[in-house]
Image (cartoon, rainbow, N blue to C red):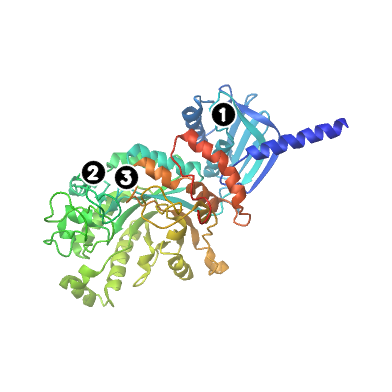
Amino acid sequence: MRNIFFALLALISSVSYSQEISIIPKPVKETIKKGEFVISSKTVMVAEGEDAKKAAAFLNDYLQDFYGFQLKIANQPGSNYIQLLTKKIFSSGTGDSYSMDVSKSAVKIEGNTHEATFYGVQTLIQLLPVEKSAKLKLPAIEVEDYPRFKYRGLMLDVGRHFMPLDFVKKYIDFIALHKMNRFHWHLTEDQGWRIEIKKYPKLTEIGSCRNGTIIGHHPGTGNDNEKNCGYYTQEQIREVVKYAADRYITIIPEIEMPGHSSAAIAAYPQLSCFPDESTAIAKGVTWAGDTTGKQVQQSWGVYDDVYCPSEYTFKFLEDVLDEVMQLFPSEYIHVGGDECPKTNWKRSTFCQNLIKEKGLKDEEGLQSYFIQRIEKYLNSKGKRIIGWDEILEGGIAPNATIMSWRGESGGIAAAKQHHNVIMTPGNYVYFDHAQSKKEDSLTIGGYLPLETVYYYNPVPAELGPAEQKFVLGAQANVWTEYMSNPGKVEYMIFPRLSALSEVLWSPNADKNFDDFLQRMQAQYKRYDLWNVKYNTKGIRKGE
């Protein structure tokens, strides 16, 4: 009877902890054990080497920010310690895998790579209580884990609405806390140029400011008549790049071309095929300030005034990209390529002559020529390009990676041509879309509840095994036409970012939305601990 009693007690303890263990994204394997580990200010962290100390610093910053204390870094374990290890010899086959063992006396995290050790720290954070305390109890558990995809990304558009530097860093922390590893930074747009280019100072003197912004949904009910300005200096960008690298996140900068280029054209009108024409104002838009000459756009949408494929433009872009490449160590540079109207190219004598001179079929071919010329330049500098799926039109650039946003068809076509693909279809991962049927804030439209994000599979069924390997992963896009401040961005990404993290990290076979929702109960409390805004509506399809 006594043995039965203790067995029952152990079972009850195990069930209790299983309810408390709410790791997102869900690990590949987790085994609950008996007992607990207690973190207090007396706990030490054992972290040898610079990379282990990066992971330790992240954990210490987290503990300080949300629990009010830090841990001492030591070279040797004590009686109560957290040990961060990375294997000296890489084990092939499992990539960024890690193991974690939480026992009564220690937490041991061992990664196959330095990145994997860092991901183990994110799992440890998921085990921490969601209430502030001087002593933090962790359930005893063993975890074996590794990511499903190697590209796990989140984009932020700072062109439509500039976001402060501190929030950009916070956004990078959100990416890290969800075991994601790519930050796609959309830096140029019709409505604002956000990166300092020393050779072309007017890009920030003129292109980083617009005289006003429409009120309400495009074309708007008026104009706020307020200057909207902002850009990042090169020194600030270096700071952000290092901040991301310390979290094993690669920043992929986007310099949009040949469309979405009104801000650059406002600064340097010669980039337009029609430099003497004033900027066209969209129908129904109330304009603030001067309407003559080239202007930074004040409303959303797509505009006809795009880069002219002239030698002046190509020299300008090469100069810009030279400075961008000095700032961002990323293998990839994103060159946009989406939503480029051909209206001005069709009526431009220069463009029509260029089409004939180069033996191109039409304006689609001219866009392909434009992108391929930029790709060739970037390849010569050791870089590769990413472009939206429109760069497939007229013939894809030889070494380009495709971001498939207009559904999955572009990604499928590119994978079948043996090009790398990042899936980012609007109907699954556009976080600017409404989260519920009765959305209580202004959005661009669309409908994307949490359940739809959770059940997304980035590998289309149309691809065979040999083609599936070209799908590197996926990312969510956060376009900010209707997100004018950091709080609105947070509200639009949470909780959908948590669902996406599980899509990109966890095995696809064991998807269970009810289980995910149960684990989300603790995650909502963690959002509260982080003091971020989040949505609680639009959870299931149809809501």
Mark 3 or 1, nearer chain start: 1
Whether residue 543 can be seen here: yes
Residue 116: horizontal and vertical position, in percent?
Answer: 55, 44
Mark 2 = which residue? 229
The image shows residue 144 at horizontal and vertical percentages of 64, 45
As drawn, which residue projects farthest toward the right?
1
Tag 2's secondary structure?
strand
Q: Nearer the viewer, mark 2 or mark 1?
A: 2
The image quadrant that residue 3 belongs to is top right
Element type at marker 3? loop
- Tell me how far mark 3 sits from mark 1, CA to CA: 40 Å
Q: Nearer the viewer, residue 107 or 485?
A: 485
Q: Position of residue 364 (x, y in %)?
A: 30, 72
Asked if residue 397 shows in the view, the reply is no
Within-10-Å neighbours for mark 3: few <14, some 14–19, many 20+: some
Left or right placement of residue 244 versus residue 198 in this view: right
On screen, 272 above or below 220?
A: below
Q: CA distance from mark 3 to mark 2?
A: 12 Å
Dot 2 alpha-carbon crowd within 10 angstroms: few under 14, some 14 to 19, many 20 or more: many
Which residue is pictured at 23% across the width and 43% down the height? 229
Whether label 2 touches label 1, CB < 8 Å: no
The mark closer to the camera, 3 or 2, is 3
Amino acid type, callout 1: Met
In this image, 35 relative to 491: left or right?
A: right
- Nearest to N terminus: mark 2 or mark 1: 1
The residue where tag 1 is placed is 45
For the N terminus, the quadrant is: top right
Compared to residue 494, the image places residue 477 above or below, namely below
